[in-house]
Every structure is written in C-alpha cells, then in structure tokens.
Image: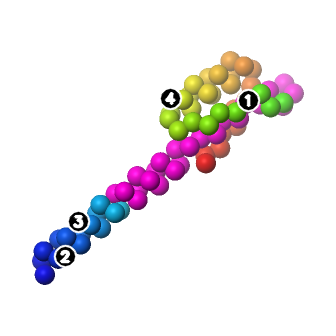
C-alpha cells in the first residue's frame, strides 16, 4: 500500500511539473506593435517568445520614434 501511494505521488508530481511548464510557456509569447507617436500610424509589429528579443523590439520601437503596445498572447 505504501508503494502504491509513493508511485501515485511521483506520477502526480511529474504531471503537475509538466503542466506548470507548458502553462508558463504559453504566457511568454509577446506581441509588440510599434505605433508612430506623432500621428499614431502603424509602423510594424513583432512576436517574440524570449525576453531578449522583447527588449530588442522595445529598443527598436524607441529608435524608430514610436510607442510600443505590448500584448501577452
């Protein structure tokens, strides 16, 4: 009986760990839309899943003279 509960606990822990990782990954997709801050025209948009790419998109938008709109997908 003790072996059965240990096995079930191990399976539950693995399932929960895999579920948390997939959920965390789903929230890491970020859409950055760059809008011209003078006349509010659309400049470009970019989808990224890595924080470094997200920061690069924000920097690029500022260099292009725009405002960044951020949406988490």
Pointer 2 and pointer 4: residues touching (CB < 8 Å)?
A: no
Q: Kindly state the secondary structure of the residue where label 2 is placed.
A: helix
**Looking at the image, is 29 positioned above or below residue 51?**
below
Q: Which residues are magenta?
A: 17-40
Residue at left offset 72%, top offset 19%: 64
Residue 15 relative to residue 51: left or right: left
Residue at left offset 29%, top offset 60%: 14
Residue 5: percent from the left, percent from the top? 19, 76
Q: Earlier in the sequence, mark 2 or mark 4?
A: 2
Crowd tier of the residue under label 2, counting other residues whose Cα lies within 10 Å: few below 14, some 14–19, many 20 or above: few
Q: Earlier in the sequence, mark 3 or mark 2?
A: 2
Residue position marked by numbered label 1 in the rendering: 44
Q: Earlier in the sequence, mark 1 or mark 4?
A: 1
Q: Is 21 inside the magenta-drawn segment?
A: yes
Foreground tag (1 vs 4): 1
Residue 52 relative to residue 41: left or right: left
Q: Is 50 inside the magenta-drawn segment?
A: no
Q: Which mark is residue 5?
A: 2
Pointer 4 and pointer 3: residues touching (CB < 8 Å)?
A: no
């Amino acid at each position: 009986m003790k072996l059965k509960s240990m096995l079930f606990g191990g399976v539950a822990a693995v399932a929960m760990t895999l579920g948390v990782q997939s959920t965390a990954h789903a929230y890491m997709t970020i859409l950055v839309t760059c809008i011209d801050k003078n006349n509010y025209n659309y400049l470009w948009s970019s989808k990224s899943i890595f924080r470094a790419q997200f920061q690069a998109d924000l920097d690029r938008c500022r260099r292009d003279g725009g405002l960044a709109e951020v949406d988490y997908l």
